[in-house]
Amino acid sequence: MAKSAEVKLAVFGRAGVGKSALVVRFLTKRFIWEYDPTLESTYRHQAVIDDETVSMEILDTAGQEDVLQKEAHMRWGDGFIIVYDITDRGSFEDVAPLKGLLDEVKRPKHVPLVLLGNKADLDLGRQVATEEGERLAADMACAFYECSACADRVGSGGGVAEAFHELLREIRRRRAVQ
Ligand code: GDP
Ligand code: MG
């Protein structure tokens, strides 16, 4: 990836899974409790990954878009994070249809993707086993992390930043072979 490379990341997942909290955590290393659930925001950010500076735009979707809006966001993005909430089974069931739409929009290109099971700090309310997340990610041929937007080291060893960095690396690997 050239020094000036600009990548576009989009975060998908049902409203309430913690997309905004995760993006804000990645950008500021802080947790913000309340975020307007209907808000869609774009952020600019730079990170150094393996000694290379990457400039990125991050689209934090609201999660309530209709299919046409979703498709437009998917066409825009180079890489994607699909988030579910480990305490909300329905949000996990939303993942496969989102991935299906993503494949349709991006076909025949491979889609750099990371699956994130958020709210891993709420283990008592868990409705989705870690193994189910792992299995789904294996089916989708993407990386998987459980994490928490409010506690950076909860889950399968993965912090929030680690998930974003893995996505950026995957985009870079794909660009290298194209
Ligand atoms: P979005 O609709 O996907 O953007 O979700 P938000 O980021 O607005 O978060 C929805 C709610 O879940 C808010 O009340 C957050 O404070 C809360 N939340 C987000 N991430 C976590 C997390 O990792 N752990 C816990 N306990 N709560 C979270
Ligand atoms: Mg939000």
Image: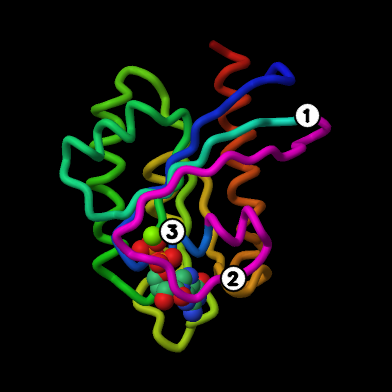
Whether residue 151 is visible:
yes
Residue 165 percent coordinates (x, y): 65, 43
Tell me the residue that label 2 is attached to.
31
Residue at the limit of the structure toward the right, as seen here:
51
Left or right: where 94 falls relative to 153: left
Query: Which residue range is magenta in the image?
Result: 23-51
Q: Quadrant of residue 106?
A: top left
x 62%, y 15%: residue:
176
Residue 35 coordinates in the image, percent (x, y): 42, 67
158 up-or-down from 50: above or below: below
> For the residues marked 2 and 3, what is the alpha-carbon distance in whole angstroms?
12 Å
> Relative to 69, is 45 on the left or the right?
right
> Could you tell me which residue is drawn at 33 percent across and 33 percent down?
74
Q: How packed is label 2: few (under 14 Cα within 10 Å), some, or many (20 or more)?
A: some
Quadrant location of ligand 2?
A: bottom left
| Residue at numbered disc 3 | 19
Residue 177 to residue 160: above or below? above
Residue shown at the point (68%, 31%) measured from the top left: 54
Which residue carries the number 1 mark? 52
Mark 3 and mark 2 in contact (Cβ < 8 Å)?
Answer: no
Question: Which amino acid type is shown beneath numbered disc 3?
Answer: Lys
Earlier sequence position, callout 2 versus callout 1 = 2
User: What secondary structure is found at the residue carrying circle 1?
Assistant: strand
Q: Is mark 3 within 8 Å of ligand 1?
A: yes
